[in-house]
Image (tube, helix red, strand yellow):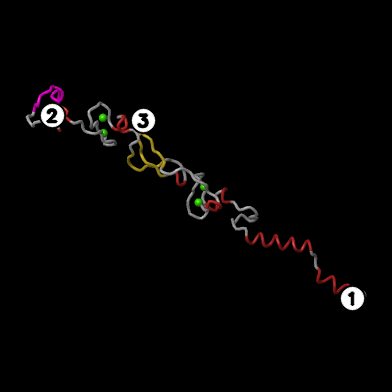
Amino acid sequence: MTAGNTCSDGLDNDCDGFVDASDPGCTTPDEICFNGMDDDFDGRADCADPNCDGARGDPCGSGLPGICSAGTVTCQGAAVACVQNRNAATEASAAGTCSDGQDNDCDGSMDGTDPGCAVPGDLDGDRDVDEEVAVTALSLQLQLYPLPFTLCPLHFTLYP
Ligand SMILES: [Ca+2]
Ligand SMILES: [Ca+2]
Ligand SMILES: [Ca+2]
Ligand SMILES: [Ca+2]
């Protein structure tokens, strides 16, 4: 009962007890997005059909690095776009994202090579500050108290 004007003529054309809009045969099928067909016969197929606005289809690549790379084909208005599944986040030691094996901020570098994961005081670029801090502390101590144990015996030797 979808053909022609039999769904708006006020008659039970197929004699099933239902007239026009009440007849199951007259209900308009829904547009199925991403199947290449104009399913609801409104002259617009898939993303070109406003009924598909915001509809999501197959996985796709956004072209962005890191966690932003995975996307989903999405109808945006009448256009088809690959919308990334995850937005860029923070990649820094404070955020705990410097050892998760992911480029969290989508800048093309991850974890140890990401500028956001740089450790203040890391002198050799190994993102590990422990040994450098220890060496610095020892150097500072030697500058403040230079060789106290060798000077005293020398003093007693000169003035016995
Ligand atoms: Ca369709
Ligand atoms: Ca349509
Ligand atoms: Ca990371
Ligand atoms: Ca990064």
The circle drawn on residue 87 is: none
Query: Element type at marker 3?
Result: loop
The circle drawn on residue 77 is: 3
> Type of residue at label 1?
Thr
> Type of residue at label 2?
Met
Residue 31 rendering spot, x and y as whole percentages: 25, 33
Q: Quick check: is 153 in the magenta stretch?
A: no
Q: Residues within 10 Å of mark 2 (few under 14, many from 20)?
A: some
**Where are the magenta residues, as a range?**
1-13
Q: Residue 122, located in which quarter of the rendered image? A: bottom right
| Residue position for label 1 | 157
Q: Quick check: is 3 in the magenta stretch?
A: yes
Locate residue 23 relative to residue 146 in the image: left or right.
Answer: left
Q: Residue 68, located in which quarter of the rendered image? A: top left
| Residue position for label 2 | 1
Residue 92 rendering spot, x and y as whole percentages: 55, 50
